[in-house]
Image (spheres, rainbow, N blue to C red):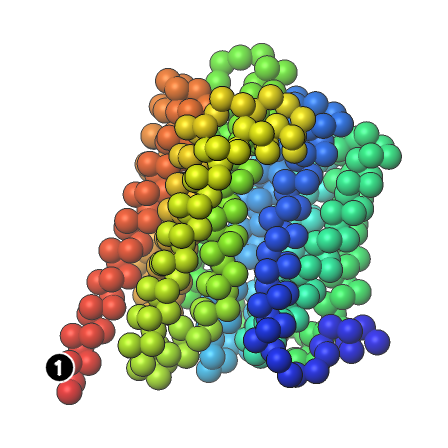
Amino acid sequence: MLKRLFLGKETGLEGKTFVWTISSGIVYALQSLIFLAVITNLLGEATAGVYSVGAMIAQQMMTVGKYSVRNYQVSDVREKYSFQDYFAFRIVTCLLAVFIMSGWIFFGGYTGERAVIIVGFTVYKLAECFSDLFEGLYQQKGRFDISGKSQFVKDFLMIVFFVGAVFITRDVAVSSVILAAVSVFLLVVVDFPLVAHFSKLGVRFKFKKIWGLTFACFAIFVSSFIYVYINNAPKYAIAGLPMPDTERDAYQGVFSSLFMPVFMVDLLASFTMRIWITKMALFHDKGDRRDFKKIVLRQVAVIFAITAASMLFMFFFGGFVLSLIYGIDLYGYEAENVILMLAGGMVSLYTLFENVIIIYRNQQLSILISIVSFAAAALVVPICTRSGGIFGACLGYLIVNTLRAACYIGMALYYMAKEKRSCAAAD
């Protein structure tokens, strides 16, 4: 019955894919927003700040668990690696994430409630890592609609359980443990039966394959890890401000509330980007440069349109909407809202052109961009935050992401021009 519910009939897949991609993307984006909003309204800004730090570390661990294999997996149209290879590799990376998390808690001096929140949210995010692997298989097999449907169901149920737990217990630590348990349960109940329809549910630990994926995706992983670090750089900078813990936690809660809509631009743009990425890979594999370029330009236009609309909306209505959602006074941050939306557009742009580099299989060289971005974030964001507070943190974030986007665009255009020259010479 579960298979029939999720698999359905293989007709009208484009329409189903569009609907479920939008639905799952909205629920996924709302998940973090709702978590923070409920905690802020029920338990206050300081508790929201504690939650934000725990969620921030869990997000960083998720990048280790995923190792940025998804886009490589779905563009592996010739299936150089089997699903069993990808599954084995995901187990290795998630175990590595658990090891790093343990060290982070120990050396970071996190104890009690803070440590439990970090562990709970990390387990929840590692379950998402396995969901991402399975959803990549569905997408690779031409059933992206199933990816969206399964993600929608799981994320919706996790919102219900976590929000319910916070309302009942008034304790974020207990609620995070419940969230972790539910995420693992849904993974087993929803995804395991579906995977068996497309591939044998098993693992194959072959050193050659694991090393191959480690090397193939290393540059993308570094880029993704630094992407998360850059997103968290303002929070790290705020955590280092010289002020009492309760005041710093409240400051962190305000910034996290303002920061939450940043990914709306990337989310809305990814509705089309996710659908088109496999087509881009197929056009490139066939040598169809014209259609490949058309999809890239179309996606750039989508990003620009969404970014402009988001900036206007947040300038005029951001204070009202955010204050209503989080139950705290967030008026007077018009400049910060506009800056953050523009930064979100930069994130979406470099994500697009990073995918272009992945399709060209030149992702290893993107590690140079990651090093430059990391250095810029570590230097610029703390300086801006110390001198300009929340406005400075937003401005530093924009500067770093603009630099990152410019580097990725330049590198992608270089490889596209290089391929064009090579084809012209061959003709």
Q: Is residue 320 left or right of residue 313?
A: right
Position of 145 relative to 323 (above/below): below
x and y percent of residue 11 in the render? 64, 83
Neighbor class of circle 1 (other Cα within 10 Å; few <14, some 14-19, many 20+) is few
Please name the residue shown 42% across and 66% down the image: 216
| Residue closer to the observer: 132 or 93 | 132
Q: Is residue 252 left or right of residue 392?
A: right
* Residue 219 visible in this rendered orientation of the protein: no
Q: Residue furthest front?
A: 316
Position of 354 relative to 172 (above/below): below
Residue of label 1 = 425
Quadrant in the rendering for residue 144: bottom right
Please name the residue shown 46% across and 33% down the image: 315
x and y percent of residue 75 in the render? 46, 73
Position of 39 relative to 244 (above/below): below
Task: Say which amino acid is labelled 1.
Answer: Ala
| Residue closer to the observer: 62 or 292 | 292
